[in-house]
Image (cartoon, rainbow, N blue to C red):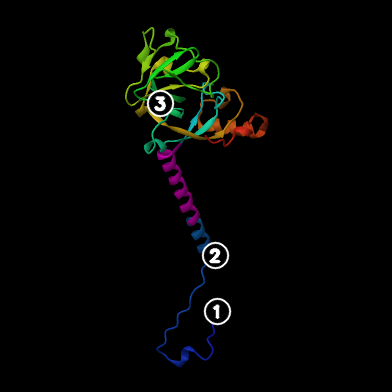
Amino acid sequence: MKQPIFPGIAPEDDPDIEVTYIEEPSASAGLWAEVKSITRDIIFAAVMAVLIVVFVVQPVKVEGTSMLPRLENDERIFVNKFEYNFTPIERGDIIVFWYPEDPSKSFIKRVIGLPGETVDVRDGSVWINGTRLPEPYTVGRTEPGDPGMFRGAFAGQNNVLPYKVPPDCYFVMGDNRGNSLDSRFVGCIPRANIVGTPVMIYMSIDTPSESWGSGAITDRVSAYANALIHPSEVRWRRLFRLF
């Protein structure tokens, strides 16, 4: 290694002087440090992503057309699971919840009746505590549930309206009233079943449901790749739409 030159000073000037030369870092050491730094950043990003999914945001698939025109079938949305820890659920909120009869399935509907309120359906409209509820977001008339389709808490009953919403429960309906399995048929949704509220549509592809296969990661990647090959299938105007 080439020794640095210090003008006017030489090691021979004092035999007790200990001379130490700083070694230049090797190229391999610099590369290894860079690899460790990148690996650390990747692990940190992965941990943060897991924490966000577990505690704050969850991706959810929209199944069916009950929320048309607000949501299309097979759209992918991000759901904020954190908001209702600090703010109350209000009428008109769109919520994602676990279906009481099958907690493995998630549904998405709009909150219509709050705890303690009386909900009725007549003259093609919803009535809350005797007052007609204005609903500019709906498609079609609102009709009472067909007793032949009653299930869960309503199974075996002939008429459930008017209905007083119990404490810690919410009466929900889909915006597309003629094609929605909601509280008119299954009863109210317990607060404990509510996951959160949508915040953004992150993917919207106009393709048959079977194109997504089983919903596994490999099938989703295949569907996304197919959308890149056929960009006309992507509903571009709906991407990243906020709620």
Circle 3: element type: strand
Q: Residue 2 carries which label?
A: 1
Residue tagged 3: 98
Q: In which quarter of the image is residue 96?
A: top left
Residue 232 in the figure: left or right of residue 113: right
Residue tagged 2: 27
52 over 181 or under it: above or below? below
How far apart are the two marked residues, 2 and 3, measured between alpha carbons? 55 Å
Question: Where in the figure is residue 194, as x and y percent of width and height?
Answer: 39, 29
Name the main secondary structure of what is drawn in magenta. Answer: helix
Question: Where in the figure is residue 97, as x and y percent of width and height?
Answer: 42, 27
Q: Going from the N terminus, do you reach mark 1 or mark 2 first?
A: 1
Task: Give the foreground label among 2 and 3.
Answer: 3
Q: Residues within 10 Å of mark 3 (few under 14, many from 20)?
A: some
Question: Where in the figure is residue 221, as x and y percent of width and height?
Answer: 56, 34
Can you name the residue that lies furthest to the front here? 131
Question: Where in the figure is residue 80, as x and y percent of width and height?
Answer: 45, 36
The answer to whether residue 43 is magenta is yes
Task: Give the foreground label among 1 and 3.
Answer: 3
The answer to which of 122 and 78 lies nearer the viewer is: 122
In the rendered structure, which amino acid carries the disc numbered 3? Trp
